Image (cartoon, rainbow, N blue to C red):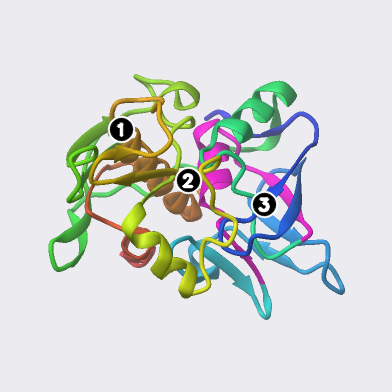
Amino acid sequence: MTKQQTIAQSFTLTGVGLHSGEKVTVTVKPATADEGRYFVRTDLPKTPTIPATVNAVSQTQMSTELANGEATVRTVEHLLSALVGQGIDNARIEVNGAELPLLDGSGKDWVEQLAKVGRMSCQGEQKLGIQVTTPVSVQEEDAIVAAFPANTTRFSYGIDFPVPAIGQQWYSWQLEQEDYHSAIAPARTFVLAEQVEALQKAGLIKGGSLENALVCNEDGWLNPPLRFANEPVRHKLLDLVGDLSLLGSLPQAHIVAYKASHRLHIRLAQRLTNQ
């Protein structure tokens, strides 16, 4: 078996949280074997630790939030997606606020920093992901996420939006065939223009802007160009990878999602944990 991986040296990024609108700084540091990926709230008394695990999920409204007691950290999916996509098993993530920065709305900045600092082996052997032997699925109306037995890890995602610029999109990705940093990481988060006011009234997306999210209406994109013709579905797949990273390692399965959400991603992870 190959060894577990961590980053070779620390790096720091600062930005604004999507929902809080607050400026926050994150420092990602090396961690030892079997520590896993975890967050440390450096702004709180006793600097509480929050594990990046399925059992730590506290809510999934428009992002994934983790908690340990009263300490929380939100919008963790982009960084976690980048870490697992780049093969980082162990990382200490120090953050001085309750939400990670959105940066440009994708995993691109995280991946670029990970590439700069490089990886190094830990002493422990790499843990194998959950091997799915029978189909497992969760569904809400016509939205579904399922895991099917497979000899490798593959993701397939489908979306369907009532605006011509998005419409129906499907994308399938396998790490061994396409590099995460070029195929998935650059895909930015997106929103329909008609949803913005309601989300703001609900106290969400306070830090959202045309600089960190794609916005679409009936006439098309308000802030083109796109990085991929199917950038929206690639971003949904980015989120799925980040959410399933909470299992510790990505499952050996073909994960298929359609019109899903963070809530459904996490429900599948919970089912896989308990199977």
Q: Nearer the viewer, residue 111 or 23?
A: 23
Q: Disc 1 to disc 2, how far (Cα)?
A: 13 Å
User: What range of the chain is rendered magenta?
Assistant: 72-96
Image spot of residue 93 (x, y percent): 72, 50
| Residue sitting at the far right | 46
Q: Disc 3 to disc 2, how far (Cα)?
A: 28 Å
Q: For the residue marked with disc 3, what is the amino acid?
A: Val
Labelled pair 3, 2 in contact (Cβ < 8 Å): no
Query: Taking 207 as reference, is 186 left or right?
Result: left
The residue to which callout 2 is attached is: 249
Q: Earlier in the sequence, mark 1 or mark 2?
A: 1
Q: Residues within 10 Å of mark 2 (few under 14, many from 20)?
A: some
Q: Residues within 10 Å of mark 1 (few under 14, many from 20)?
A: few
Within the image, what quadrant is residue 91 found in? top right
The residue to which callout 3 is attached is: 16
Identify the element where label 1 is drawn: loop
Q: For the residue marked with disc 2, what is the amino acid?
A: Ser
| Residue 3 sits above or below residue 200 on the image | above
Q: Nearer the viewer, residue 169 or 138?
A: 169
Q: Earlier in the sequence, mark 3 or mark 1?
A: 3
Identify the element where label 2 is drawn: loop
